[in-house]
Image (cartoon, rainbow, N blue to C red):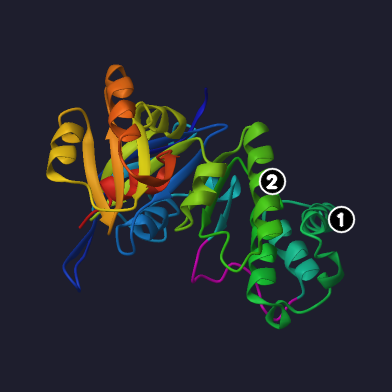
Amino acid sequence: MNTLLTVKNISKTYQKSNVKAVSNVSFNVNSGDIVAFLGSNGAGKTTTLKVILNLVSPDQGKIFFNGQDVTHNNLLLLKNSGTLLEGSQNMFFALSPIENFVYLGGQRGLSRKDAKKNGLAIMEKFNLIEKKNTPVAELSRGMQQIVGVCCALIAKPKLLILDEPTLGLDLNSTKTMIKMLQFSASKGAGIIVTTHQLDFAQRVANRILLINHGKLVLSDDIKNRLEQLNQQTIFLLKLSRAISENEKDKIVALCKLKSITQNNYQISVENQKDLPQVLKILSELPIENLQTRTKDLNDIFEDYARD
């Protein structure tokens, strides 16, 4: 698989505040990847993206695009990328969507005709075509976000960087977003998505990067990581009374027991050979409700993004 982007050992300290925003971060983005770049507020995500785009100069480290060093000369990367950065000027608010398409498409080398065609085709998928001539400033927050995504995708970039792309989007628009990103990846684009909506990240991405206090603490295939996590069986129990000490001793001898709220417990069976014995113990408890639980991206995030 072709490596589109290489981030190699980048670090950045903001001298004015003496905050080390990014520390020795390295990762690759391959053609066809959708990478969920996750972390709490202030973890270093935005600084990393700005270093990649040469909006911020790193103290050390290098950025490579298609094998070429673009650390301080990112013209090649910009010509082949589409971006949507939260809190940045991603389009001209005084212009209509179609006027933005013509201008921003022209910067990417598209003809006026192709820029209109590509932009409107994307707007149509979001059922927003009737707003094509409305000034962006008059659109809702969610509609503005869609126009920003259209501008990022208009030239069918090899690399797509989207910072919180689902802000303000309704459920249907989010579903459309997922389909479009997956289609772009199937055509060979490499995509980096930052988001606080972990359910969206789990649905759209195939890889996860997790940054905490400026350091990359996890880089993995999401499917593989979740399969490892879900090798254990987790039960959520609601009892009519509290578990007795004797019952507790029997349970913890075989598995992990966690009290959630009064008379509500979580039991994690890590060794599947113990499952029959655990089920026998559970059958003797005054259970009002029992559910199995599957670990998801929220669990990964909680494990790695702690303060």
* Residue 3 vs residue 185, the one in the foreground: 185
Q: Which of marks 2 and 1 is in front?
A: 2
Residue marked by disc 2: 180
- In the rendered image, the quadrant that contains the C terminus is bottom left
Query: Residue 113's mark?
Result: 1
Residue 89 in the magenta stretch? The answer is yes
- Magenta: main secondary structure: loop
Q: Does 286 appear in magenta?
A: no
Residue 60 % position (x, y): 24, 48
Residue drawn at (71%, 53%), measured in percent from left and top?
154
Q: Residues within 10 Å of mark 2 (few under 14, many from 20)?
A: some
The region drawn magenta spans 85-95
- The amino acid type of the residue labelled 1 equals Lys
Q: Give the side of residue 123 with respect to residue 166, left or right.
A: right
Label 1, residues with CA under 10 Å away: few <14, some 14-19, many ≥20:
few
Where does the image place residue 54, in percent across and percent down from the top left? 41, 55
- Amino acid, disc 2: Met
Check disc 1 and report its element: helix, strand or loop: helix
Nearest the viewer among 256 and 9 is 256
